[in-house]
Image: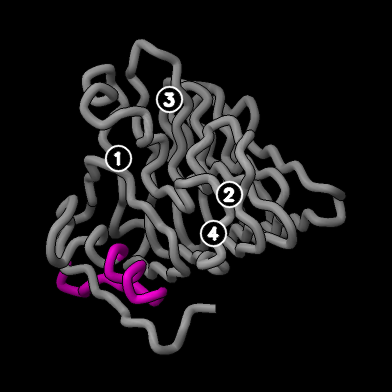
Amino acid sequence: ATPASATDGVVTNCNNSGAGSLRAAILANSANGGGTITFDGALNCDTISLLTPLYIDRDINIVGPGAEELAIELVDITDENVQLYGYDHFAAIQINFDDVNNENLSDVSISGLTVNSPRNSSSNYYPVAAISVGNDPMLNAEGQDEMNLTISDSKIIGYGQSSRGINAKLTGDSSINIIDTEFENDPNFSEMFGLMSIGANANIENMLEKAKGGFERSLKLKTESSEKISLQGYKGLH
């Protein structure tokens, strides 16, 4: 659980970086060993446009102002931007980017936000995601062990061919919890994984899919046993 002594942070602007930004709050959270990040009620913007992903490597609880109030998006994946930033910006929020088990990660919670995957307009095929555990789009890496990932009261939007809303490789007794969260896809592409999870217990409560152009594949949950998957209130609107 998040340490009680951790310093909490407040986001006061929608800048990519610098004082008062979400990135600065996450960096401070990492330095302080974990905590809760909230958003100033006087925040006068509706989108945080990122030049590079937000990297999470410590326990964190991000409490947004509401999915209809604030969105997070990463710069589009174009050939030019790949040259500038590299292919490491696969997802807007990247948890445990190093793809090795991180003992400092046990609880990551994100609520009250819209998170968009980058738009993929590169001439080179490259899958993208809104939120990823690890930096491997194909989920072949080692995976994060013993971590609980909870996404609640949020909206996840995937853009581009074979985009993923949430892409997670978790092992051991890890769990991924999707609660009261809506998934949408780019109407220009028919193929999207709303949730692609391998290895973890999957607990889904009131997950709504709003297909624009149609999902070909909406859920891909791979666990040791079907008993590790709990679906309560899953609904797809196509």
Please name the residue that numbered disc 2 is placed on: 208
Outermost residue to the top: 123
Query: Cα distance, mark 3 to mark 4?
Result: 30 Å
Q: Which amino acid does label 3 sit on?
A: Gly
Q: Residue 160 carries which label?
A: 3
Q: Which amino acid does label 1 sit on?
A: Leu
Q: What stretch is highlighted in magenta?
A: 26-43
Query: Cα distance, mark 1 to mark 3?
Result: 13 Å
The spot of residue 7 in percent (x, y) is 32, 82
Query: Cα distance, mark 2 to mark 4?
Result: 31 Å
Q: Is residue 184 left or right of residue 47?
A: right
The spot of residue 123 in percent (x, y) is 35, 11
Please name the residue that numbered disc 1 is placed on: 74
Q: SS class of the residue under badge 4?
A: loop
Q: What residue type is labelled 4?
A: Asn
Is 22 covered by the magenta stretch?
A: no
Lower sequence index among marks 1 and 2: 1
What colour scheme does the image use?
A: one colour
Tell me if residue 124 comes above or below residue 46 in the rendering. above
Q: How crowded is mark 4: few (under 14 residues within 10 Å), some or many (20 or more)?
A: some
Asked if the residues shown at circle 2 and circle 3 are in contact, with their CB atoms under 8 angstroms apart, the answer is no
Q: How crowded is mark 2: few (under 14 residues within 10 Å), some or many (20 or more)?
A: some
Q: SS class of the residue under badge 2?
A: strand
Q: What residue type is labelled 2?
A: Leu
Query: Cα distance, mark 1 to mark 2?
Result: 23 Å
Tag in front: 3 or 4 = 4
The N terminus - image quarter: bottom right
**Which residue does the image show at 72% across and 43% down from the upper left?**
221
